[in-house]
Image (cartoon, grey):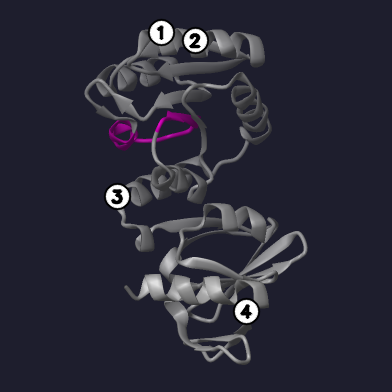
Amino acid sequence: MYKVVIIEDDPELALTLENILKKEAPLFEVLGTAPSVKEGERLIKEVEPDIAFCDVELEDGLSFDLLEKLPEINFEIVFVTAYSKYAVQAFHYSAIDFVVKPIDPDDIRRVSEKIVKSLSDKSIQERIKNLLYNNKANEQDQRIMLQTASSVYYVPLKEVVRCESDVNYTSFLLSDGRSVLVSKTMGEFEKILPSFFFRAHRSHLVNLHFVVEVKKRQGLAVLSNNEKIEISVRKKDAFLQAMKNLCG
């Protein structure tokens, strides 16, 4: 059995989540609930859980405040949130699991199955640090976690020049000339990256901040590193409008 705590300030929601876990995740045993940062800290130190389900907003602060109080985080975390897309991006960028209110049992089952497979992953401390950083940073300064076969990179979005698709892999081309190859499709990144990333072509997702010229007749975007990226015919008008919006 895996030890679970629930940090949630709404007792009805806490009970609902506990009941869903009993049905959808029978290997998870809920050993306590807490409504606040203070009580959550006490409960986590007492139980030493394998997994914590944390509401973002608590009685006396945010779950982020709780995490910053802990000297070490050696358990998995699932956030329960009604937050906006902007905050949800921070979870995506840090590879942190979350479920959106109202809670869907299918989401709990999906997340729970994923957690069981990844409990041996030792990167949770760094992932949480990245999440806490992103929660305070503005959109351009947020960092995305990129995991390769041999390393984990935390890359500021403002340093990503473009992404290039290679079937089931995506290359991140960075402003310092490095390239990071990740085993995820570009479509997955297109869903979570902010609006200043534009899919100009089937193979290219471009950071518009690096575009210095658009050759309309040739259908090319010229980047600050002198690369020329093809703009598909059907995307040209939308690309030009996106550049116009970016420049105000």
Residue positioned 76% across, 59% down in the render: 168
In the current view of this chain or complex, which residue is farthest to the left? Answer: 60
Q: Nearer the viewer, mark 4 or mark 1?
A: 4
How far apart marks 4 and 3 lie (CA) works out to 34 Å
Contact flag, marks 2 and 1 (Cβ < 8 Å): yes
Q: Which residue is mark 4?
A: 231
Considering the image in quadrants, where does the N terminus appear? top right
How far apart marks 1 and 3 lie (CA) works out to 30 Å
Residue positioned 34% across, 47% down in the render: 135
**SS category of the residue bearing label 1:** helix
How far apart marks 2 and 1 lie (CA) works out to 6 Å
Residue 129 magenta: no
Percent across and percent down for residue 19 are 55, 7
Nearer-the-camera pick, 201 or 223: 201
Residue positioned 59% across, 23% down in the render: 108
Q: Please, what is the three-letter code of the amino acid marked with disc 4?
A: Ile
Q: Which residue is mark 1?
A: 12
Report whether residue 26 is seen: no
Along the horizontal axis of the image, is 169 left or right of 115? right
Q: Earlier in the sequence, mark 4 or mark 1?
A: 1
Percent across and percent down for residue 17 are 50, 14
Give the class, few, some or many, for how many residues have Cα within 10 Å of label 1's Cα (few <14, many ≥20).
few
Q: Please, what is the three-letter code of the amino acid marked with disc 1?
A: Glu
Percent across and percent down for residue 76 are 52, 31
Q: Earlier in the sequence, mark 2 or mark 3?
A: 2
How far apart marks 4 and 2 lie (CA) works out to 49 Å
Q: Where are the magenta residues, as a range?
A: 64-82
* Mark seen at residue 16: 2
- 161 in relation to 191, above or below: below
